[in-house]
Image: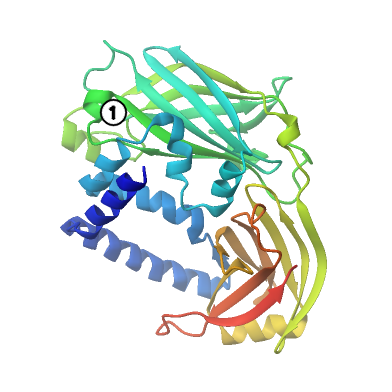
Amino acid sequence: MDRQVENFRKSVEAIKLPEELDLIIADAVDKGKRERKRRKSKRMFKKFALSAAAVLVFFTISVNTMPVFANYVQHIPVVSNLAQLLQFDKGIQGALKNEHYQEINRSVIDNGIEFGINRTVFDDKQITMDYYLRAQTGYYKDLTNLLIGEYTITDREGTVLADSNSLNESELSLSTESVIPENFTEVREIIGTMWLRFLQDGNKFSKMPAPLYLNVSKMVECASAPYGKDGAFYKEHERLPLTIDGHWTIPLNLDQELLVEPESYEHIEATAGDIKLVVEYLRIYPTVTEMKVSFDPASQVKLSTEFIDFSTYLEDGDENIYGPYIEVFRDDKAVPTITGIYGSYESSYFSESRDLYLVIKGKVDEETLEYSEIARIKIK
């Protein structure tokens, strides 16, 4: 595999990016500028940050526009794709290296489609699984892609914990990302990763319920709207995308011995220059870290008036950086000041370093490219 990775690296360096990518990036930049103006006017400093999101965007763009990447991915064995697809996530990699995972190896077939889950890495806040979807021989000969469309997640009593049709009312959220191999029409199979996460703060579960049941009721060929004759899919294939109804249920009987208590740090008061803050809590689970920070009133004003944007991450004593999945800079809607930070980060649970720091950076204006360090707070 090391030789494959090295060959992949050399191939990537030789990639000529497609012309359409410039348009995609330009459009994203324009949208970002418009979004920034909207957020500035409302003083809502929310940021859905890079760690996991960047991986998802990278997979989506690279597989559809870079044949070298697609060619590499198609040779990844299904049994190891969790490690490969999440090689950029230090927390998941640490869990796998320390054998903090469980083999599921369950699959179900309905209406010509096989849905299977191989392996899962989990704790009380997040379940990460690698899965595959496979079209059976003799079904859907013109199939171009295969995605999970609709699902529910239920507990032992049948209580619905998450529903793809009413996510705002769910205690859990499920997100998926799949890789379409270049030779999909031949292999008729996709591999992917799914994340099942508890909503932070206020959820009614202190422990991950067990068992859980993942119930898929619809597979789709296309995830992008519009789906009608005005859509991109119809223009390319001269037909509407397929939707496949069925019943695919896989029980997740998680090993309770793997549900360990998190490293927990609470009420850490700190001062960095003129900034005073309190780390209300920082909890390091095997696959994710949760944190909540509050600033004192004077610091709220300073941050709100001197900076237009922020970024945060965790760093251990070996200079390994644990980036955010989601970071939200909370604000007071009555008074336009930043009151604190609330976020989820890559996990340092299996880090060999004894030290951990919270790093807060800020950006002073639109012309400044780099973020300057505002505070470095020692957690442990």
* Residue 166 picture quarter: top right
In this orientation, which residue lies closer to the viewer: 83 or 129?
Answer: 83
In this orientation, which residue lies closer to the viewer: 5 or 105?
Answer: 5
Q: Residue type at mark 1?
A: Pro
Q: Is residue 294 left or right of residue 2?
A: right
Q: Is residue 321 left or right of residue 209?
A: left
Residue drawn at the location 72% of the way across and 27% of the way down: 210
Residue drawn at the location 23% of the way across and 58% of the way down: 21
Q: Is residue 25 left or right of residue 171?
A: left
Q: Position of residue 155 (x, y in %)?
A: 70, 25
In this orientation, which residue lies closer to the viewer: 240 or 153?
Answer: 153
In what quadrant of the picture does the N terminus appear?
Answer: top left
The answer, for residue 231, to whether it is visible in the render is: no
Q: Residue furthest right?
A: 267
Q: Position of residue 134 (x, y in %)?
A: 36, 22
The answer, for residue 363, to whether it is visible in the render is: yes
* Residue 306 picture quarter: bottom right
On screen, residue 334 above or below 201 = below
> On the image, numbered disc 1 is attached to which residue?
241
On screen, residue 317 above or below 324 = below
Q: Position of residue 236 (x, y in %)?
A: 17, 36
